[in-house]
Image (cartoon, grey):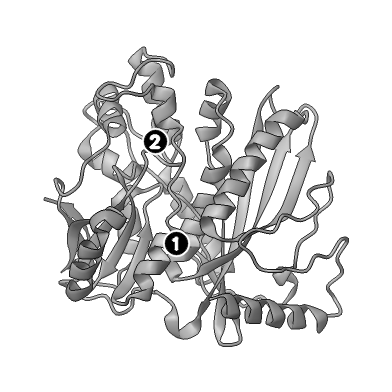
Amino acid sequence: MTNTVAAANAEISRYVAASSRLIFDKPTIATQPPLVIRPYRLFSQRFPLLSLSLLERNSISSSRLRSLPNDSDASGGLTYKDAGVDIDAGSELVRRIAKMAPGIGGFGGLYPLGDSFLVAGTDGVGTKLKLAFETGIHETIGIDLVAMSVNDIVTSGAKPLFFLDYFATSHLDVDLAEKVIKGIVDGCQQSDCALLGGETAEMPDFYAKGEYDLSGFAVGIVKKDSVIDGKNIVAGDVLIGLPSSGVHSNGFSLVRRVLAHSGLSLKDQLPGAAVTLGEALMAPTVIYVKQVLDIIGKGGVKGIAHITGGGFTDNIPRVFPEGLGAVIYKDSWNVPAVFKWIQQAGKIEDAEMSRTFNMGIGMVLVVSKEASQRILEDANGAYTAYRIGEVVNGEGVSYH
């Protein structure tokens, strides 16, 4: 893989050198990993390795939206829409963007480069930041930031190459920012990718005192003949689930609404667990990169879904060919206590939970029956994996 990365970096450099339009304020040369920290940020000054957007725009499939829930629950239980997230509006935006940029909708965007694809993804951590402000836990939010992008691009089989971040605040608290960036460094180390740099924006009066916002951007690479794209998935294939650490980085608008209705505080103990609500909710997102690439390398993986906003219901079908759906075995894995509390405290229907949260499974691999047996056997001791369902004829996701 190191040779592949080095070759890709060399080829990228040639593309840049050939383009007279590319002018860099402070150019940097990538020397691959496991981690390279560039001379870090100057305010309002970017220093990308390259600007592929200035090259021919030949995007094949780019992710766009973590869309979520639907209408309010007639039973009186809370829904994501009640918490302010409207899936219909999000879907309409994607529909309009698709007219201008056909091909969007995957977990990552693919850009052709020789015999490989660059795979790019971008994301934030949403209103989980609100809980970081309230709990004072800033050391791990950077891990969440890296995870959301690298977990997306690994679904194509891509090995992350590098990561860039955007940190914005009204008044720069250097000690707080250092904690956040330390988490980003940790996330890059877990992903075996380079942190090249990013942007720190200090914008007076824009954010509340002590608050900030984050965005992240990851680029990886995969050989064209090794792309995981789901096109060979057939009925009878097996769904393998890899466990999450908890809520990860989606659904926090609803979580915060549930918390407000529950009468509990973030310092109270999570019912059924030995940690506080704050500790459980702030558990960093699992970075699946090394584990997934290892499983892919052994063969039999046909499709991969990162379970983010939209849960199983919206994310798993994204990797299926037309006419196929999934059956999920509801009792095939251990649902973490935090989800049980959220559902009970918010009186949330099963369907809404499955369409909003990961429910304890952060990544789903669609594999052949033969591969599933090997993966589950290899999991003994090395990692945890569950057989959580199967591919069936007919669209949609059902739960049994």
Can you identify the residue that label 2 sits on? 81
* Residue count near mark 1 (Cα–Cα under 10 Å), binned few <14, some 14–19, many ≥20: some
Mark 2 is on which residue type?
Lys
| Residue at the extreme left of the image, as rendered | 400
- Occupied quadrant, residue 344: top left
Can you identify the residue that label 1 sits on? 290
SS label for mark 1: helix
Is 309 rendered above or below residue 55? Answer: above
* Residue count near mark 2 (Cα–Cα under 10 Å), binned few <14, some 14–19, many ≥20: some
Relative to the observer, which residue lies in front, 51 or 99?
Answer: 51
Earlier along the polypeptide chain: callout 2 or callout 1? 2
Is 244 rendered above or below residue 347? Answer: below
Mark 1 is on which residue type?
Lys
Is 257 rendered above or below residue 72? Answer: above
Residue 155 image offset from top left, x and y in percent: 42, 65
Tell which tag, 2 or 1, sits nearer the viewer.
Answer: 1
Relative to the observer, which residue lies in front, 270 or 51?
Answer: 270
Residue 134 image offset from top left, x and y in percent: 54, 21
| Residue at the extreme top of the image, as rendered | 263
Q: Can residue 23 be seen by looking at this rendering?
A: yes
Q: Can residue 385 be seen by looking at this rendering?
A: no
In the image, what residue occupies the spot 51% across and 61% down? 63
Residue 212 image offset from top left, x and y in percent: 66, 33
- Occupied quadrant, residue 315: bottom left
